[in-house]
Image (tube, helix red, strand yellow):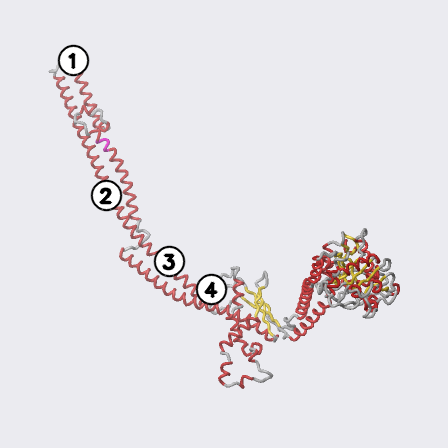
Amino acid sequence: MLMKRGKSTIPVDEAWETGDEIDLRHYWSIVNRRKWSIIGLALAVGLLTTLVVFAMTPIYRASATLLIESQAPNVVSIQEVYGLDTRSQDYLATQIEIMAGRPIAETVVDGLGLIEQPEFTPPHQRPLIGLDWRSWLPFGMQQRTSPSPQNERERVVDAYLDKLRIEPVRMTQLVRVQFDSADPKLAASVAEAHAKAYIDSTLEARADATRSATEWMATRVESLRKELQASEASLQAYREQEQIIDASGLKALPAAEISNLSARLLEVRQTLAAAKIAYLQVTPVDGRGENLLGVPALLADEGMRRAQTTQATAQQTVAELEKRYGASHPKMIAAQSELAQATENLNNQARSVTEGIRKRYEAAKSEEAAIVAALNRAGQQYQQVGRKESKLESLQRTVDTNRQLYDLFLKRLSETSATGDLASARARIVQHAVVPRLPAEPNKRRIVSIAVLLTLLFGVGVAFLLASLDNTVKSSRDVEEKLKRPLLGIEPLLGSEALRAACTLGKSDETRETDPRFAEAMRTIRTAISLDSLDKPHKIILVTSSIGNEGKSIFALNLAVTFGRGERTLLLDGDLRRPSVGKMLGLPRDAPGLSELLTNRAQLSEIVIGTGVNDLHAISTGFIPPDPLQILSSSRMASALKVLAHSFSRIVIDCPPILPVSDAAVLSKYAHCVLYVVKSDTTKVPQIRNGLALLERVGAPIMGIVLTQFDVRKAEKYGDYDYGSYEPGAGPSRA
């Protein structure tokens, strides 16, 4: 079924499909088209891989598990001797690197004698069929071909490390030591030996560290002992020099003396202050008694108070007697004499008290000066004693420090010497290596599966690559995408019987045994041509192709037969170079045709023949002219077509291919529509485009593309196109 879109027609069953669905089906069809090639290649590669895998030497893997403790059991606290922080997060990684290093590998290689093992012998050194061919060489060449023992050992160690695997167990302190070998017993023995070699190496490292520490500490202890003796000798010499017996009471006596003198000085200064005040009070006094009454220092004296009282009494007596008696009265004289005596006594007492105050003041000053001098002497003595004590303490600290260091190193030396032979390793074997029963490599199933999978992927990739490189037209999708032209119809590929029926007109149209789908396709194309221009039907229909052998002539014949069912139709063979219509009509080679008409050798009525199929007539080519292009481009050709157009409703012209010759370009000037025939899955897209471009250059009315020799069975198988609903009873066609 076809539907119309502008002037182009496309299959109805493709018109409703969306882009994503078309793409998925298209990709699947690419893979499906080459599925047997892909599967065959995968099976071949899988079989070859299986043979190779089964020919490979099986490799066995043995494993020993170690526990590497982060804290070693300490018999005595001498962990500082080894200088190893086992709490560090990098400790386990460090031990794994040590375990995978060359020193341990060399120990195992030498201990097990792996240099002599056949597995570690280079292929060129292995005897060939039991014969040592190197013994046949001259002596000099034997020397040159034999590697040195050192190089041989290095090569074996390298091979050993290639077969060794050290794998930590996540989130644990366990480490697996694995070794691969073709000999399962050798694999187990090497894995076990490597684990033990690592433990021995740790013990040896600890022993070496202990010996080094012991030697160093012994030397250090001797040096500290000498330093301690020298410091003690210096301390004792200083004691003897300064005559120090009791260092603790060295400062006691000067300190007590200074304390006592300080207290006494305070008392003396208080006394001196009081004496100075009294002395300053009596200093201005002139020694007369009447001037002493206002001096507090003198009034404080008891004698002065009695003398003042006596003088006051005498003065009162004189005053009384002076009122009663005269100056020359004996009592008056006696009273005055007593007053003079009392005044004299008062003055004498004042002088005596003043002298006493002065003496006390001077005595206090002298005592203060003496105490200050004594206190200065005591301070100097205290400072001198302090300097001695400081030096003594410094010497004592030196002695104490040297003694502490000496005791510490002597204790560590004793501990290290006592535990020097103690084997306390940080690693131990928790799972010994056992002889493996099954090989670890090669994993035959995995290798074969991966090879088959990769081959399938490679095959699919190659299929897509070939599909992208394929430059032919296979379906209606390719016509629209690659050629950008409308598809008029698809002519299916016919079987041998149907092909013979389609190429001949020996039978009537009702008895021709053509493929039902082929007949339906021709009717579809006829309908498309008829509906393309209802007002002005296409009378002259030109059929051409890019190159030869594209089914152009068979298509032209059957299209003419289809039009001949209801319209007066003429099939004109315009291929004057390789004619085929006469052969299909069964005409003799010398029968007159188009060449005779164009060269005036025959009339039109002589060359038009009936075919016996409905209302179909035909004109063959006749003789082959030397210059067909000149004949076709003549005015007689145009005139002949005009006459024929009046007599026939449809004229189908079978033309030569457009690329080899220009006949189709010349005849296209007379045609009302041009049908371009393309052979499915054969003609290259560039050829088709070039042919269409040539026709477009001359203004040919190209109506669309007809896809011929389309393999319907293959298309239905791969899902490219569906013809099953056209003829329910139709049998499959043959390619």
Residue type (three-letter) at the residue carrying disc 3: Thr
- Viewer-nearest of discs 2 and 4: 4
Residue 711 appears anywhere in the view: no
- Viewer-nearest of discs 2 and 1: 2
Which residue is labeled 2 in the image? Answer: 373
- Viewer-nearest of discs 2 and 3: 3
* Separation of residues labelled 2 and 3 (CA atoms): 42 Å
Which residue is labeled 1 in the image? Answer: 324
Q: Is residue 701 above or below residue 380?
A: below
- Give the mark nearer the N terminus: 4 vs 1: 4
Check disc 2: other Cα within 10 Å, few if <14, some if 14-19, many if 20+.
few
Q: Is 463 on the left-hand or right-hand side of 414? A: right
Which range is magenta? 275-279
What's the residue at 50%, 63% (across, down)? 74
Coordinates of residue 670 in the picture (x, y in percent): 76, 58
Which residue is labeled 3 in the image? Answer: 401
Residue type (three-letter) at the residue carrying disc 4: Tyr
- Give the mark nearer the N terminus: 2 vs 1: 1
- Give the mark nearer the N terminus: 1 vs 3: 1
The local secondary structure at tag 3 comes to: helix
Coordinates of residue 350 in the picture (x, y in percent): 18, 28
Quadrant in the rendering for residue 64: bottom right
The local secondary structure at tag 1 comes to: helix
Coordinates of residue 250 in the picture (x, y in percent): 30, 51
- Viewer-nearest of discs 1 and 3: 3
Quadrant in the rendering for residue 392: bottom left
Which residue is labeled 4 in the image? Answer: 82
Q: Residue furthest front?
A: 600
